[in-house]
Image (cartoon, rainbow, N blue to C red):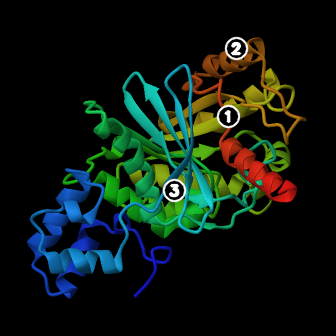
Amino acid sequence: MTTNQTKPSIYGLTRDQLIEWALLQGEKKFRATQLWDWLYRKRVQSFDEMTNLSKPFIALLKEQFILNPLEQVVVQESEDGTVKYLFMLPDKMMIETVLMRQSYGLSVCVTTQVGCNMGCTFCASGILKKERDVTAGEIVSQIMLVQKYFDERGLDERVSHVVVMGIGEPFDNYEHLMNFLHVINDDNGLAIGARHITVSTCGFMPARIKAFAHENLQINLAISLHAPNDTLRTSLMHINRSQPLEKLFEAIDYYSETTNRRVTYEYIMLSGVNDTPEIAQQLADLIKPRNKLSYINLIPYNPVAEHIKYERSTKESTAKFYDVLKKNGINCVVRQEHGTDIDAACGQLRSKQIKKDRSEKTTA
């Protein structure tokens, strides 16, 4: 019999996989349907609460799975309603999840890897290198624990939007990512609409962007761009050495032609680095041929102590940059900020906690 640390979370199974598993155990299909209902409609916190399942079946579930594999370590609440969670995984590694209150509903940003190897020089997530992928069950659990907060308080609120923009590169964890998306999008479960889900990639393996085009999902694709030319982008994002803009946009164009879906480009504004009117014109020229299916998010930079060479663009610089794009007919917006009074940069809370733990061990 496996230990809790090595048992998978049942949240990692899609509904079809859960049905297949139940049938292999000699159970009827409707048992899997009942189980799915307990997990995602009633959202129980233990197998023992599943009162219409037989005791032998519950014993089997306990033997082969755990329910929620995450332990809450730190919670930070912002004045604007943003909540940042630090969760511990069964192997004691830690990940971050963020709840953001938007005008259109509750949006959760999930993490797909413990650490990150993409090497973006401005990002807190990459300060600590990738240690492992986060499993589909562990990604789903991030949503379930955020939703649990509202369920326990009897609040009639539900997670309605999901962005896969936390620590790590989602397309470097493709299989677990896809299982996660199918679980949360399932109409018989959490029923988070595909058009309310966004996956962000820095361009790791353009072939995965092409594969994503054939998943037959209406899920949104976002590209972490941050520079309109290879020289500047390589200085900011090491992934650009192996996957330069020509390769990246060949895959993006394939995705757009195949799906006819809009691509969002994320662009963090770094003072004196990528925020001049000249660079804005380069960005406009890059996007113009694709503007019908493009949208640019200009993102205020959240300073990171380890990356002191970068500062946030001024409001004046951002406004000038925005104006150049708009004059060129580019669809763009300056993203609303969330959680600026807490550890706002992605990966910052995790990095701080790990340093604290290491310091305590050293002084003990």
| Residue labelled with disc 2 | 319
Q: Quadrant of residue 297?
A: top right
Asked if 247 appears above or below 223 in the picture, the reply is below
Residue 108 placement (x, y as % from top left):
45, 40
Labelled pair 1, 2 in contact (Cβ < 8 Å): no
Taking the spot 24% from the left edge, 78% from the top edge, the residue there is 59
Taking the spot 47% from the left edge, 69% from the top edge, the residue there is 175
Tell me the quadrant of the picture where the N terminus can be found: bottom left
Mark 2: secondary structure:
helix
Which residue is the extreme one toward the right?
Answer: 309
Q: Quadrant of residue 324?
A: top right
Residue 142 placement (x, y as % from top left):
45, 51
- Give the alpha-carbon distance from disc 3 to disc 2, as whole Å: 32 Å
Taking the spot 70% from the left edge, 63% from the top edge, the residue there is 130
Which amino acid is tagged 3? Tyr
Labelled pair 1, 3 in contact (Cβ < 8 Å): no
| Residue labelled with disc 3 | 254
Mark 1: secondary structure:
loop
Q: In the picture provided, is 57 more to the left or to the right than 298?
A: left
| Residue labelled with disc 1 | 343
